[in-house]
Amino acid sequence: MRGALFGDQVEGYKEAFVYNGVYEIANAPIKPCAEQWKSNPDELNYQMTFGRQTIIEVVNTKSGPILPEYYCISQIPKAGNPNDKFDVLGIVLYVEEKARKIVTSQERELLVQQTPSAVLKIIYSLQNLQYLTSYFFMFYSTEQPMIISTWNDLAEIDCDTLFAWTKKFSVVGFTALRVSTHKGFSLTSSMSTTIIHDPQGSRARALEDWVLQHQKALSDRQARVLDVRNPSQEKVIITINALKQKTVHNTLQEERRWLKVVIPEANIDIVNAYLGCSNCGKRTDVPVGKAYACTTCSKKDCVSSPRITFNCEVSDGTGTLAITMFTEDSEKLFRMTAPDIFQVKHF
């Protein structure tokens, strides 16, 4: 069941609840909950509200402070229940300087920041921390930094503090994160997420000791992250063979490299031209030029437009690679607009 706090109640009850705490709550009215406020379909059709006569008591007062249950990154399922939440502990390597505004399909503005994207922070996973010495090279040479996206209040307030801590390699805890599959496997904040700037417990102390012993390795990894997040104007060209050597263990998310290749057969006869959403490109049966609401990207003011895909093989002397070009790149390759290509293919 969902509990709802409004206005000044949010600050007033701030110290009354601890994440993962167990409480007895009395005199909290139960009211119907509108379907639109549910975060998942398993929630009851009611919500608990809090008033002046509400009493909140800790069930076990002798249990001591409640610490997050930190997960190793390897323990978090890549595909599971989207409502599952995880606590992680890591080292801050990069934080975007400013939160970005994202406008949703409902025309609402959201603040998001990245380490590396809308408010994202990159941190090292705590995987194999209990075997720190034995797994040092596995930890650094095989594990990517993890991207965490934080939204709204977390993006504005807490991330300002974390940005100053990237030079210190501070150990930070994140609670109640959700799995995100946008641009690969990453984590994103939920309404329950808190950022713990001074995490307690044996795992936090072990990671802090590890940081002190491996400043050089952390600096090298941070430099690589910065190179990806703030690329130089010079294009880095690699071979197809070098690209094929890239794996999940030696490639960072959002890393971009250039290939200099030959397209042996750029034949417009094998181009796929279709009608799709002007925003996301999803195929549609709506007549060309007609406005409609796209159910894929949830935009209401989309227009049915000619879209292009072109599948081909490219080579550079070190190997061949099958690629798919989409509308903008296909227009550059054939030096024709998408409407012109669509006209050639269908009329």
Image (tube, rainbow, N blue to C red):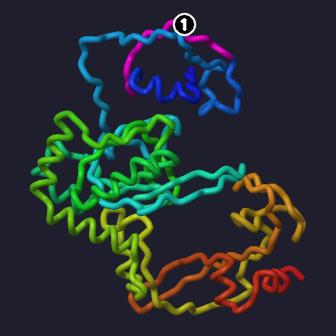
Residue 86 in sight from this viewpoint: no
Q: Residue 269's x, y, as percent? A: 74, 86
Residue at (44%, 47%) from the top-left corner?
78
**307 in relation to 11, above or below:** below
Residue at (63%, 52%) from the top-left corner?
109
Q: Is residue 33 left or right of residue 79?
A: right
Q: Tell me, yes or no, whether the highlighted magenta stretch contains residue 29.
A: yes
Query: As rendered, which of 195 and 1 lies closer to the eye?
Result: 195
Q: Amino acid at mark 1?
A: Asn
Q: Quadrant of residue 285?
A: bottom right
| Magenta residues (range) | 18-31
- Residue occupied by mark 1: 27
Residue at (51%, 54%) from the top-left corner?
112
What crowding class fits label 1: few (fewer than 14 Cα within 10 Å), some (14-19), or many (20 or more)?
some
Q: Residue 146's x, y, as percent? A: 36, 54
Residue 203 in sight from this viewpoint: yes
Q: Secondary structure at mark 1?
A: loop
